[in-house]
Image (spheres, rainbow, N blue to C red):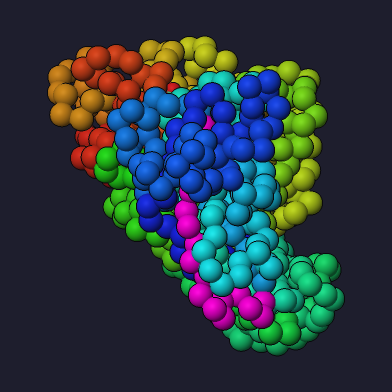
Amino acid sequence: MSNVLLRDRVSLDGDWNVIVDPYDMGYVGILGDRTNRGFFRDFRPRHPGDRVEYDFDASPTLTVPGDWNTQDERLFYYEGTVWYRRKINVAPGWFEDGRVFLYVGAANHTSRVFLDGEELAIHVGGFSPFAVELTGRLDPGQHSLVIQVDNRREPDRIPAMRCDWWNFGGLTRAVELVSVPKIFLRHAWVTMSPSGAIIGGVEIDGADAPVELSIPACGIDTTVNPGERFEFAASPERWSPGAPVLHDVQWSCEDDQLIDEVGFRTVRTEGEKILVNDEVTFLRGISLHAEATHGGRRSQGADDASELYDHVERLGANFTRLAHYQHDEHMLREADRRGVLAWCEMPVYWSIAFDEPHVLENAIEQLDELILRDRSRASVIFWSIANETPNTPERTAFLSQLASRARQLDDTRLVSAALLTPPTAATDQHVDDPLGAAIDTVAVNQYLGWYYGERSDIATTTWSCPHGKPIIFTEFGAGAKAGRHGRPDEIWTEEFQAAVYEAQLVMINANRSDLGRGPVAGISPWILKDFRAPVRVLPGIQDGYNRKGLLSEEGDEKLAFNVLREFYQ
Ligand code: GCB
């Protein structure tokens, strides 16, 4: 279900009792089969001789939402299963007439949901939301809700065995009960097509019934048919980067009603340019991980989103790359309110099992969960299907299918993927990846002046691709430890990082498509803030952090922050 933030909800956030279960014995028995006496039964001894070898009531707690790694030192590097248990006390009268769903904002990576001992659902994917219907199961009284969360890295998961970020485990986003009427609006979305029409769709659950749609700013007050795409001509005041205008959109169907705030803007490409509201727009971006501005923990919720976008605004960016997975819905709503464009991304990162049909199936599920949730957000202009994947026929076939699926669900936005450039020092960089044919913009992660190439050559480097499409530098950058100073040729100093930015920005200016100088239509340097990554081991410098942030992990600005800020101003 989508539009959950617009609905009546009962929060299940707070302390949950947890059992850490590295061998998964709360689910499987000694011979590897599913046990019937697993932790999900939430048993308590009924008499002194009763053999129950676990006890949620006496077990420690973790705060939900939150990663487990930064809440308990012993779980810092933990990858495995943790069982979460929360009692739900249902008062008489609750949920009597309508339906009720459990909604989990994100649980990394695979989770199973149990209510009163019964297994109800499994969800695969660590960053996208899911709903489980509990209608008829929450009579007045006390209930046991158990969620098994397992963040192991596995070859057939997405992402798979390796990535350059912390594998935060747990119920990392809000967990809520959502009540809706018997017949309800399961999905309802509206946006603006590239030609400026108001388009959208609606799906209802429970019965077939007409849906009323009212958007006063568009002069729309009409009935729309569930399951069909609608399209209306209208000219509302536009949402645009830096000038975010949101309009009331009201949906009603039988007893259900949703009131959303939606912005309308167009986005399209023309040759090597990107046009927003038919104006050629250079993307002044910045990349972000979902990590809070303080404490090196997973970010979640409206407050973290607002703090992250405060920094984005101070930088003067008009675009954010939300890497490398689906971020919290609050991030996109914040971007809508602030007038900042956004790139949403799938966790198809580096090498995954591109030849496994069930992996493609899961990628499609995860993509659906992202697009169905965020299709009405004006800020979102890109669905990105992958980051730095190997150029093989299996990869290209897999990602071409994801690109088609994205367009099937939403053909109003651009589809892209961040590609690997061959790590060469050449000053005429040619990005030739067959995936370029299947996507609307060719996004390139390039590390000239850091992983390869002389800094002195950066400024004169030129870029091309065989597809005649806009190129976006979705990454460039250099590492620096905040507070470390020295000469610009001394690695890890703020001066070194600032000098790489200066050279890159000269080159970027000389290749900008909005100025008619080349194919580069935008940038989102890597990255706003230092972020945790277990692969970053250099003592005294990295200490478990990727140091390419413009801000330290505590939000202190490095010199490069101002270099980019001045460029954006
Ligand atoms: C990349 C990856 C990103 C890494 C970054 C780095 O190309 O896309 O996830 O964190 O480089 O710092 O090396």
Left of 36 or right of it: where is 498? left
Q: Where 317 sits versus 393, above or below? A: below
Q: How many marks?
A: 0
User: Which quadrant would the N terminus be assigned to in this image?
Assistant: bottom right
Residue 339: quadrant of the picture = bottom left
Would you say residue 548 is visible in this rendering? Answer: no
Examine the structure image and report whether residue 404 is included in the region drawn in magenta: no
Q: Where 321 sits versus 427, above or below? A: below
Q: Position of residue 534 (x, y in %)?
A: 39, 22
422 vs 223, nearest the viewer: 223
407 vs 233, nearest the viewer: 407
| Residue occupying image coordinates x 73% and y 31% | 359
| Residue occupying image coordinates x 58% and y 43% | 40
Left of 96 or right of it: where is 354? right
Q: Position of residue 313 (x, y in %)?
A: 34, 54
283 vs 428, nearest the viewer: 283
| Residue occupying image coordinates x 66% and y 50% | 118
Would you say residue 448 is visible in this rendering? Answer: yes
Query: What are the residue bounds of the magenta stretch?
Result: 81-98
Residue 538: quadrant of the picture = top left
Q: Position of residue 324 (x, y in %)?
A: 52, 36
Q: Position of residue 238 (x, y in %)?
A: 55, 71
Q: Where 492 sits versus 417, above or below? A: above
Q: Where 352 sits versus 297, above or below? A: above
| Residue occupying image coordinates x 57% and y 67% | 178
